[in-house]
Structures are given as C-alpha cells and as structure tokens.
Image (tube, rainbow, N blue to C red):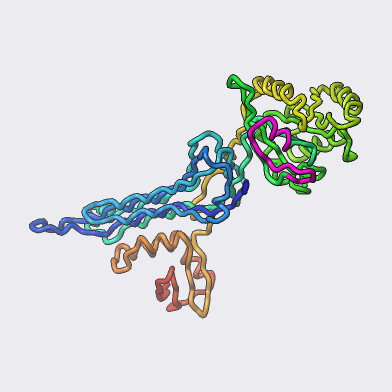
Amino acid sequence: MFVDSAKIHIKAGNGGNGSVSFRREKYVPAGGPDGGDGGKGGDVIFVVDSGMSTLMDFRYKKKYNAQNGEDGKSTRSFGKDGSDIVIKIPPGTMIKDVTTDSILADMITPDQTFVAAKGGRGGWGNSHFATPTRQAPKFAKSGDIGEEREIILEIKLLADVGLAGFPNVGKSTILSVVSEARPKIANYHFTTLSPNLGVVDLGQGNSFVLADIPGLIEGAHEGIGLGHEFLKHVERTRMLIHVVDVSGIEGRDALQDFETINRELEKYNETLAQRPQVIAANKMDLPGAKEAYDIFKEEMQERGYEVFGISAATNKGLRELMLYVSSKLKELPMPIVFEPDVQEAKVYTLEEVEQPFTVTVEDGVYFVDGNWVKKVVGSTNFEDTESLQYFQRALKTKGVIKKLEEMGIQEDDTVNVCGIEFGYIP
C-alpha cells in the first residue's frame, strides 16, 4: 500500500544527572568532591533510504524516543551518552512541524540526514561547584530535558515528468507501455488510487522518471475526488504530459478538459500552471478521433503548446512523444527543493514553549508544577543547607513566591512542589 503522509511523535533523550560524590581514599583526608557529569541524551535523526518508497511503517509505530544519557558517577566519571535513534524515510519526504506548520527539512538526496530533535545536555557533577568558600558542595545539576515535538512526514514524489489529466483518459496505459511499471488498468474512473512511478528508458543512458498522478477532476484543489491527496505529487515534476481523450467517446471535450485541469493546478499552486506542458491527444485509434484532433491541435498550437496524437492502446506516437519530452528535460532545472522555513524551524525546548511553572490550589494545598520546577527540584539536595538556600532563591527569583502570595497563601499553609511538601513561612 502506498502511504504518503504520517503524523508521529518524537522525543530526544534527556541528559543524565550530575553525581554528588566525595573522594574516599586511605591516607587522603578531605579528598573533596568528585561527582562526574551526566551523559548527553540521544538525538532523533532522519536519514533518506533509497530503498524505501512509502511511509507504511509509520502507520503502526507513532512514537520514537531516543535513549536518555546515563547519570554521572564517582571519581569524576562521566555518564554514558544516550544512543541516537535513526529513522529511515523515503526520498522526497518533507518533514513539517505540526504546531507551526513550517517546513523543517526536504529530504531528497540519498543518505541525507536531519536532526529533528536534540538530546538534553548532561548535568554537572558536584565537582564543578567547589569553591574556596564552598569546598564540599552536596548538590549537583540535573540533566536537561530532550526536545520533543509532533511532526508530519509527507512524500512528494521525485519524478521528472508527471502525467496529468482526467480519470480514464489513458494515463496508466501510457505509463505501462513506455516503462516497466504495471499499474492497475480498467475501463472505469479512479482505477488508479495511488501514484505510480516508472522509468522511461530510451537507450544510450537516455532515461527519466515518469509518474501517473491520479484523481484530478474539477474541484480537486478543494478535496473533491482524490486530487487533494495527490496534487502535491505534481509539485516536484519538471514537466507535465497533459493527457486528453481526443476521441470524445465518453462525451468528453478535450479543450474543456484541458482548461479545467489547468485551473485546478493553478488554484492548488500557481506555479504548477506555469510548469512546461506537452499535450498527448490519446485514443487516436478510435473512430472520429482524427477530425477532432485536427481542430484541437490547431487551437493548442495557437496557444503555444506542442501536441502529439497518440494511441496508448496501439503504441502509436508514444516513442516520438517520449523523445520530445527527454529533449526538453535537458533544458529544464532539476526538481524543486522546498527550503526550510528558517524563521520557524527552530526546535523550541519545553522551557521556551511552556510556562516555567503553574500554581493550583486543591483542598487547601498549593501545588507548584512545571518542567522548570522539576529541573530545580532534581538539582537540589534537601538535606543540605546550601542547596536548600539555592532552591529557595530560585523560587523567589522566578516569581513562584510572588504568585503564591497573589493567590492568598497564608503562614503554615502546605505547598507541594513536584511531590515534595513544605509549610509556607513568609
């Protein structure tokens, strides 16, 4: 099954906590603090795998977490860094942030990598906090929290040329004849339910990738039919082969169909309507097609389009069409790369996107919570006077005490800070 979009949650590893430790060695009195630093948390990394063509795997696994860093150890031993998690994606996958809807990366080239979430830094051990006046610090710093976000993965096919046109005009048949692709072909609308790719090999190294883009009908840009799902796959193509049914056997009007599809392309993305097009007037083998073709070709040539009369069923005119397309591709730039939205692509840490703390009251108890508060609590040794003083200063500096007073806290009221309870003393 071809799956071209997926929404997943990624979480980088947290940094390990610094260690509180003191050197204990015979004949070495007052060895001093020797707590080591915590290890860095693992990153979440995306890498392009040329062997993949669909996002099917992401339908079943939605959460990806990198490994946390290890805590520091005694004797100034650092904790081990957490392992990165590497997520493989197909070429042509765009990575977007759910919150900002900004483009983070456009993954096109083989083995291209992108760090979507960075692991937290490891915390310092107590050996870092020793000073001439504080020679035995009994506290360390906790590790930083790893970055976390929801992202959307979206494939935009990497094809040189796209087959555009109404359903049942012969696009899939053309693809099956000129390449080794074997799309489903039947005489009813919407036979093709997913894009198909094929390589057109004209010999002597002259080849290009051709895509059958399904689901284009009037109103496709608004989600009618299948167009809303598959119009995006036209965006990377350098050129379009616009296929029309010139026979009129189903009551179709080739000129009207041509104008309708181009309006849909323009409404979806204005640049698509400006993409170079060559017209393939299909079903020339049917009765009455020749007369209609002559009228249609004259009109299109006046508008500056090249028109090829073809029959996908009998293979008539297809090689000439493909040779023309190949010659035009040599004059056109390489597939479009979507530039990351630099302004919005910054990965914000939890501290930056969330309030540093929240205060709520329940049954007379004041609950203080938040990621910043958890980090401070993790860095505090509540049995050490200096560390406890640091904790109290941090709450006051950040505005926690002021917020409690604004909410009406009184002396001896209970304050719960991330599970640790205190009696409030002004």
Instruction: Give the quadrant of residue 314.
Output: top right
> Looking at the picture, does residue 4 appear above or below residue 125?
above
> Is residue 185 on the magenta stretch?
yes
Q: Residue furthest front?
A: 314
> Is residue 62 on the magenta stretch?
no
Left or right, 140 with respect to 283, comes to left
> Looking at the picture, does residue 310 appear above or below residue 55?
above
Instruction: Give the quadrant of residue 353.
Output: bottom right
In this view, the residue in front, 309 or 4, is 309
Residue 371 position in % (x across, y down): 46, 60
In this view, the residue in front, 3 or 358, is 3
Residue 97 visible at all:
no
Residue 276 visible at all:
yes
> Looking at the picture, does residue 393 appear above or below residue 170?
below
Instruction: Give the quadrant of residue 213.
Output: top right
Please tell me which residue is depicted at 31% across the width and 51% down the height of the picture.
80
Left or right, 369 with respect to 81, comes to right
What kind of secondary structure does the magenta stretch mostly adopt?
Answer: loop
Q: Which residues are magenta?
A: 172-191
Residue 93 position in % (x across, y down): 58, 41
Left or right, 312 with respect to 148, comes to right
Residue 386 position in % (x across, y down): 30, 63
